[in-house]
Amino acid sequence: MSRLGWLNPLQSGAERITVPIRLSVYRFGQGLNNGLATVSDLWGVQSLRRENEKLKAEILASKGVALRSYSLEEENKALRQQLEAPLPPQMQFLPAKTLGIIRYLTLDKGSSDGITTGQTVVSQNVLVGKISAARSGTSEIILPTDSDSKIPVRTLRTNGRGLLTGEAGVGAFLDKVLQAEKLEINDLLVTTGEAGYARDLMVGKISKVIKNDVEPFQKARVELLLDYGKLENVFIIK
Amino acid sequence: MKIAILFFLIILFSLFQSTFLSLNLLLLLIISLAVYLPVKSGLIVVFGMGFLADLISGGSLGLTSLCFLSIVMLINLYRSRFHPDQLRFLLPFTFLSIILSHLVGGQVIEWGRILINTSMIVIFLPFLRPAREWPL
């Protein structure tokens, strides 16, 4: 019945009530996670994570983008920065708030806002994912870390092409790269514009090259540029 | 009063599970209730709980109900052979139910988290033992 759409009015009505509540609960959950991270910072356990975040910010800053985490009060700043991001001027964006992350990242915009499956979602000029399901008032994004996610990418330095494949929700690796391509650690990866993703969106950087001469392709471990659990505001490319 | 608390717990767990909590507390609640409630009323209650959980979380309506109903029917099937509130039956059953819910929901299977989730059934059981006398 759900698939036939008979229950859509009930579902839309429930979404109107539950979306603001889920937003508050998710922000509470994010605050809890940040608080726990701060506590472990005090014990010096997460100093490597802070250094990692700093390095990520330096990389993005060098490409004209600063990686920030936004508070609710900085939503306007997020909008301004999205407009200033080095993306084609003809692109139109719809802002959305994150409602939760279990397997997929849920947003507070859906088909009633013009969202359709397959649309690309970004944070400045960094890829967040693609809309995999759109209900009336909410939608879900398949993240690059999802096992079903396969994103055609290229290295910014040498234009070497490969397929960014998700790894059980915890990471991603670059696959199907020809042996002749020269991959190096810290090579930035951007989308090629294929498979429905917008072009030239940053995704991650290579952290380890896995090369075996007997295989036709080489692989690489990829460090993604975003912590999807910390995102509060994202933008859907219309 | 007890029904109100149950209702409140369903809403709370559904909200947490659909936003940031990856532990399946609703499933533990269902299993604990199924152990103590009569067969017929247990199935109706569990179906309603699943439907409410889907409404709150925004998932496909009916999917959670179907999953919960299957689990409760299995408990009822083995009621004649095992005492369902005994841990030697309940722990492995909860473990398998959690894995099944992860597979149905497409979630990543993290064994450590699943073991923690399974062991939490021990906390739920004593609180729901009075469900035997509930007017359902």
Image: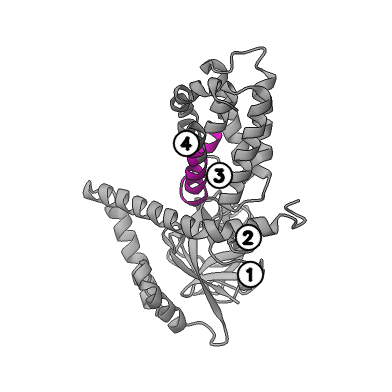
Q: Residues within 10 Å of mark 1 (few under 14, many from 20)?
A: few
Q: Would you say residue B10 sits in the magenta stretch? A: yes
Q: Are marks 1 and 2 in contact (CB under 8 Å)?
A: yes
Q: Which residue is mark 4?
A: B5
**x and y percentages locating residue A123 in the rendered image:** 47, 71
Circle 2 — which element?
helix
Q: Amino acid at mark 3?
A: Val
**Circle 4 or circle 1, nearest the eye:** 4
- Disc 4 marks a residue whose amino acid type is Ile
Q: Does mark 2 fall on the same chain as mark 3? A: no
Q: Which residues are magenta?
A: B8-27
Are the residues tagged 3 and 1 within 8 Å (C-beta)?
no
Q: Quadrant of residue A229?
A: bottom left
Q: Nearer the viewer, residue B98 or A17?
A: A17
Tags 4 and 1 on a common chain:
no
Label 3 and label 1: CA atoms lie apart by 30 Å
Looking at the picture, does residue B9 appear above or below residue A98? above
Crowding near the residue tagged with mark 2, few <14, some 14–19, many ≥20 C-alpha atoms within 10 Å: some
Question: Label 1 is placed on what type of residue?
Answer: Ser
Residue A68 at least partly seen: no
